[in-house]
Amino acid sequence: MARTTIGKPPILEDSRLTLSDRLSIRRTILSVDRTLLSWTRTAIAFIGFGFTIYKLFEEIAKGGLVEGVRPQTPRNLGLFLISIGTLCLVFMLADYVRAQRFIGLTLKQSLTKPAVWASGAICLLGLILIILMLFAPEAF
């Protein structure tokens, strides 16, 4: 079998494929990338909203503007939203790799794409925020 570049699926080198078939495969690859990036955008919204809610409710509770709010409520709500965003992104990354394998890309080829790196960085940010909110809330 011929050597392929990192981003090029071996299926595109099949001489039996017509130009239409090759373009269809390319469109599918780009569609999977767009789906990952849209989930990344959604995860960023969840993580950002969770952190904002945490800080906002924390200040409201400290200021005594609302009575009967438990001290851990802002942290729990923020943790929930950040966890939802991070978990969605982890599951989508797994689905992305599965879809890339179905198309014909290897794991190495899938993990070298910029969309995966961006999503991984947002996952890491979410995990760091979760850990800090659980074990070092005074860091904020």
Image (cartoon, rainbow, N blue to C red):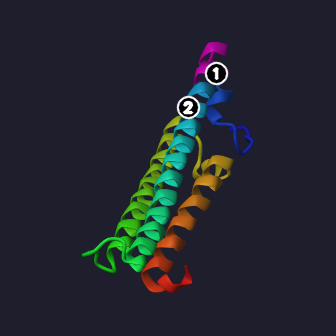
Q: Nearer the viewer, residue 131 or 13?
A: 131
Residue type marked 1:
Arg
Q: Nearer the viewer, residue 81 or 124?
A: 81
Q: Quadrant of the N terminus?
A: top right
Read off the residue under disc 1: 22
Secondary structure mostly seen in magenta is helix
Residue 51 lies, with reference to residue 23, above or below; the image says below
- Answer with the quarter of the image where residue 54 lies: bottom left
Percent coordinates x, y for residue 13 in the rendering? 68, 28
What residue do we see at 57% from left, 66% from top? 125
Res. 133 visible in picture? yes
Alpha-carbon distance for marks 2 and 1? Answer: 14 Å
Q: Nearer the viewer, residue 139 or 11?
A: 139
Q: Which mark is residue 69?
A: none
Magenta region, residue range: 15-24
Of all residues, the one furthest to the left in this rendering is 68
Percent coordinates x, y for residue 119 in the rendering? 58, 54
What residue do we see at 61% from left, 48% from top? 110
Residue type marked 2:
Ser
Q: Quadrant of the C terminus?
A: bottom right
Q: On the rendered structure, is 30 left or right of 5?
A: left
